Image (cartoon, rainbow, N blue to C red):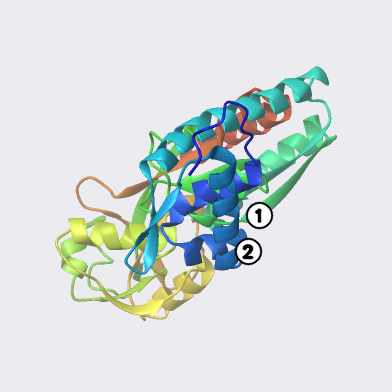
Amino acid sequence: MEQVSSAFTIDLRRLGALRELDRRGTLAKTAAALHLTPSAVSQQLAALSRELGVPLVERQGRGVRLTGQARVVLQHADVISAQLERARADLAAWGHGERGALTVGAFSSAISGLVPAVLTDLAATRPDIRIAVVEAEPPDLFTRLDAGEIDLAVAVDFAAAPPFTDRRYTRTDLLTDILDVALPAGHRLAPLDRVPLRELAADPWIVGDGHSCCGAVTRSVCAAGGFTPEIRHAVNDWQSLAALVAAGAGVALVPRLVQPLHRPGLVLRTPEGQPPARHVFAAVRTGSEGDPVLTAVLERLVASAEQASS
């Protein structure tokens, strides 16, 4: 391969494919995330490699892995992306942020528990800011944030979310969302004010799928309590979950962000000891935090989280 040229250019779309491969790990998963074929992703990476004059991927078994040069490129990609976002924010600030459009991506209970107050406030105080809401969870949430399809992401810290140190994003902590135990009203532990989670080890559980933030958090909480739950029902919708608990089909953990779940036959109890919780945060592309429209929405989101925590 030729020596690196001092006049090389970088196609940002191809750079985005390299960043997504770093996140997903395989060409097939990268292609699915970018709505491309694996062949098209390979072509983008090969073209970027030619542009830069260095190898970016190498074969590893049946798959590929990033080269050391690719890791160097990715370090600069974070800086390039942040600088472009700062330019975008500076241009937006020129108009003082009185008018604009923004897309918020969030998991379902954040949409129901946090976003409505933001929309109500903005409709009354900044009617020329148009907000679109998209339901999504990591890793797809952050793929869409990287691609510019989403401007502000609301997520829960769990394995599929980016690490706290990821320089691509500027984070704002929103709230610590405590999880309560949902029991049928006739359950043997329902009379207790605080329920020992370990006492529910033999009960059937109602849990979201393992790829969702709530499903993953419930599994980790049970593991920390010293048991693996018998998952009898896999349900992601909170109202459906509450209906199953009330019907005596099992027990569950329910975040306070989606409460109250008013349903006859359902009781909510605080777990014994340090209550389990999930940590909710907002993230924007690094460099975009100076955008006045984004700032206005984020400020109201923080206020909504404070109200939900009180």
What residue does disc 1 label? 134
Residue type indicated by callout 2: His
Q: State the residue at coordinates (50%, 46%).
A: 19
Q: Residue at x 65, y 41 (%)?
A: 11
Q: Position of residue 89 (x, y in %)?
A: 70, 25
Question: Could one spot residue 187 in this view of the protein?
Answer: yes
Residue 29 versus residue 94 in the image, above or below? below
- Name the residue that disc number 2 marks: 35
Q: Nearer the viewer, residue 222 or 246?
A: 222
Decide: is 139 above or below 123: below
Q: Tag 1: Cα neighbours inside 10 Å, few (<14), some, or many (≥20)?
A: some
SS class of the residue under badge 2?
A: loop
Q: Depth-wise, is mark 2 or mark 1 nearer the camera?
A: 2
Residue 236 lies, with reference to residue 292, above or below; the image says below
Q: Furthest residue to the left?
A: 226
- Residue at 23% x, 73% y: name it: 188
